[in-house]
Image (tube, coloured by chain):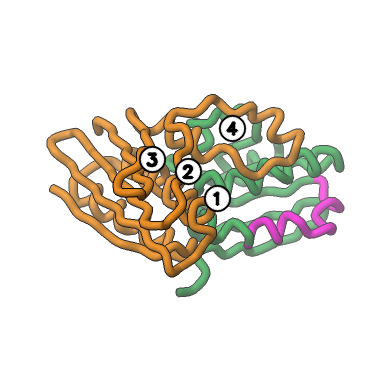
């Protein structure tokens, strides 16, 4: 079976966009964790997470974002989610994470956030 | 209607579990949001059984049974491993601000399950751990 999560990094000036494609669970979360662990991430002002093709997230996926959030904030790197499917946003809502993380509808709003 | 599946204790099999639950509920014509919530609840419990109760030993296996009668969904996940795994069913709300400050990865799975399902219980049957989840579906 192939990987169920693909992460594509698109750097542009002071912004890094990570495009997520697939399902983020206890098996695939390590792929995202590896990307967010890269030291060069802290050189950007903003890390945007494009969730358009993220079709599923479990607590393991949420945990990866939570575990890196403080480190990013301490380095003045803003983490912004955009293009999130309703069913994925609902998982953030169930735990109340939608009020602790920056989630906006569009890429344009993410760039302006 | 009802259906069942048996999987070995590898986290690679979580996708198969989700596909199974999705297929069952989609055929019962439930909304995308409800299907995803139930899939998530099952995924969380199965991941806990695989990782924490069985140490990802793929010689061990789990049985999953789904039963839908009218609007009432019953789910039974039976762990055939030799170690009893009996976490609390309903759990307290996690302090997410503290989790963020601590950079903590885990500790949210059973909170999600508790908030999604109407009933969550773990019990022992024939020296095995069984998790029963139930929910009245909209």
Callout 1 environment at 10 Å: few (<14), some (14 to 19), or many (20+)? many
Of residues A33 and A112, the one drawn nearer to the viewer in this rendering: A33
Q: Residues within 10 Å of mark 2 (few under 14, many from 20)?
A: some
* Magenta stretch: includes residue A38: yes
Callout 2: SS: helix
Question: Do the residues at discs 4 and 1 belong to one chain?
Answer: yes
Quickly name the residue at label 1.
Answer: A51
Task: Residue A40: tell me if it is visible.
Answer: yes
Q: Report the side of B105 relative to B3 (left or right).
A: right
On what subunit does the disc labeled 1 rest?
A
The residue closer to the viewer here, B53 or A47, is B53
Q: Write the residue at 84% across / 58% down.
A: A40
Q: Which residue is mark 4?
A: A97
Q: What stretch of residues is rendered in magenta?
A: A31-45
Q: Could you tell me residue B107's position as x and y percent?
A: 59, 38
Chain A: colour as depicted = green
Say which residue label 3 marks: B37
């Amino acid at each position: 079976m192939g990987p169920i999560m693909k992460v594509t990094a698109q750097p542009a000036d002071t912004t890094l966009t990570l495009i997520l494609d697939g399902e983020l669970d206890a098996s695939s979360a390590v792929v995202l964790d590896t990307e967010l662990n890269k030291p060069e991430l802290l050189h950007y002002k903003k890390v945007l997470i494009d969730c358009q093709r993220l079709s599923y997230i479990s607590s393991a996926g949420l945990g990866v974002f939570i575990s890196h959030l403080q480190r990013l904030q301490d380095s003045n790197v803003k983490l912004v989610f955009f293009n999130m499917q309703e069913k994925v946003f609902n998982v953030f809502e169930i735990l109340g994470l939608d009020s602790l993380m920056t989630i906006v509808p569009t890429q344009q709003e993410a760039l302006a956030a | 209607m009802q259906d069942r599946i048996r999987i070995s204790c590898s986290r690679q099999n979580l996708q198969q579990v989700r596909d199974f639950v999705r297929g069952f509920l989609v055929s019962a014509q439930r909304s995308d949001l409800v299907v995803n919530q139930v899939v998530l609840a099952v995924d969380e419990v199965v991941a806990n059984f695989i990782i924490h109760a069985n140490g990802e030993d793929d010689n061990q296996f789990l049985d999953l049974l789904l039963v839908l009668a009218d609007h009432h969904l019953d789910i039974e996940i039976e762990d055939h491993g030799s170690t009893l795994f009996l976490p609390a069913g309903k759990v307290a709300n996690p302090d997410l601000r503290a989790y963020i400050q601590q950079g903590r990865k885990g500790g949210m799975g059973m909170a999600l399950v508790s908030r999604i399902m109407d009933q969550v219980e773990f019990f022992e049957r024939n020296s095995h751990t069984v998790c029963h989840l139930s929910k009245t579906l909209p």
